[in-house]
Image (spheres, helix red, strand yellow):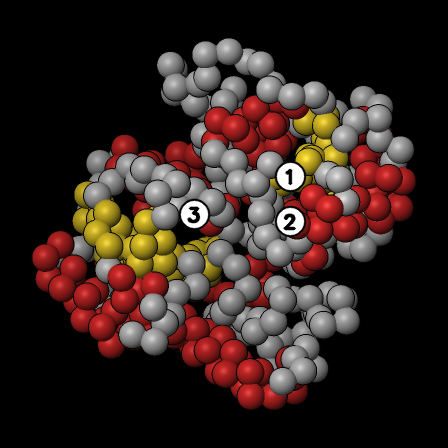
Amino acid sequence: MRILHITDRVSARGGADWHLLGVLSDLAHRGHELLVVAGRDDGTAKAPVPVSIARPLAETRRARRASEALEAEVRAFRPDVIHLHNAIGPEVLGWGAARGAVATVQDHRVFCPGRGKLTEAGETCDVPMSTEACAGCFREGDYFRRIYEVTAARRDALRGMAGITVLSSYMKRELSAAGISAERIQVIPPFVHGIEGWDMPAGDAAADTDAGGAPCVAFIGRLARAKGVYDAIEAWRRAEAHVPLVFAGTGPERERLEELGFEVTGWLGRRELSALYRRALAVVMPSRWQEPFGIVGLEALAAGVPVAAWDSGGIAEWHPGPLPAWGDVAGLARELRSALAGERRAEPPRLSPRAELTARLETVYARATDSS
């Protein structure tokens, strides 16, 4: 099968980016002919298949030029199926829907114009998107109207797709609540790849197993309030941890965390991230936004590291438990303390076989081609 993948960027910096690279690798291994069309390549990853850069994809105000570029790619490659990834512009999503494409939804930007189902007051949001429900999360009316219109346009474009895949049952429920038929949404969780000691090909792992640093508690991800960076600090303090708290990632809170005296590594490549997992006695995940899945936690468990997390979004679908309720810092500290004391060991993650997950995606492709 000839499959054209369309994404905003080729990168290894985000969970969605890394998951896409794994999907591409598996599909290529199974004999499919693939081409990726991306708005940009940030140089952090080498895609396992050919990549064509269409810069208008990365420029939201050049929708017509993006469509023209994609039409040229379709004429040259002649795909059997088109697969769109991430929340690219609504015009491109509409273009894909008109051509019977498949879309993967990896975050909230098709059903929440705000902070990932997190209100301005910092509480979880459990109501479907509407102008009345969402306006209260914005202070500036014109900005709200613009971002709401873009979000609604993405959602409406999805309704025309030949198939939709999501990473968790949580995301399926949210899309269904937003008005997309649940029958058309297939849950295909991500799989772990590229973590040394888990499934690296022979000879691809680092030459030694030195952890490269002292034991620690690790927070891995975007350094933002919505990811719970300050809740992680409070839980670490309450747990009276005997090891430092290390932040891996970057984001708007990085400078403040450094001012507070914490070690902040910045973004880590896969070898460096594997080394951090070897250092970590626990990973802490107090996600305030509702996690679409939480692939960092899945990787940690696969690496044998216990994960102290809240019940947020799709986390309960892979975490072996117990999970404190969302916002329960005391409960998070209790679980972190248990992990550091050796009372809470990492259980194997709840995983479907990798080949089975790729086969599910092939079934989605087959249905899309049958309906075209």
Residue 34 in percent (x, y) is at 22, 45
Say whether residue 253 is left or right of residue 104: right
Q: Is residue 11 left or right of residue 106?
A: left
Residue tagged by mark 2?
A: 254
- The quadrant holding residue 334 is top right
Q: Which residue is mark 1?
A: 264
Location of mark 3 (residue):
17
**Quick one: SS at disc 3?**
helix
* Disc with the residue nearer the chain's start (1 vs 3): 3
Please determine whether, in this image, residue 227 is positioned above or below residue 56: above
Question: Looking at numbered disc 1 in the image, what kind of residue is underneath it?
Answer: Val
Q: Neighbour class for label 1 at 10 Å: few (<14), some, many (≥20)?
A: some
Mark 2 or mark 3: which comes first in sequence? 3
Asked which secondary structure carries label 1, the reply is strand
Residues at discs 2 and 1 in contact (Cβ within 8 Å): yes
Above or below, comparing residue 321 to residue 170 in the picture: above
Q: Residue at x 58, y 66 (%)?
A: 174
Q: Residue 122 versus residue 309: which sits nearer the camera?
A: 122
Please tell me in which quadrant of the rendered image residue 157 appears.
Answer: bottom left
Residue lying farthest to the left in this orientation: 76
- Number of residues whose C-alpha sits closer than 10 Å to that of mark 2, classed few (under 14), some (14–19) or many (20 or more): many
Q: Which of 256/300 is in front? A: 256
Residue 35: mark in rendering: none
Q: Whole-percent x and y of residue 212?
A: 60, 20
Residue sitting at 21 percent across and 52 percent down? 52
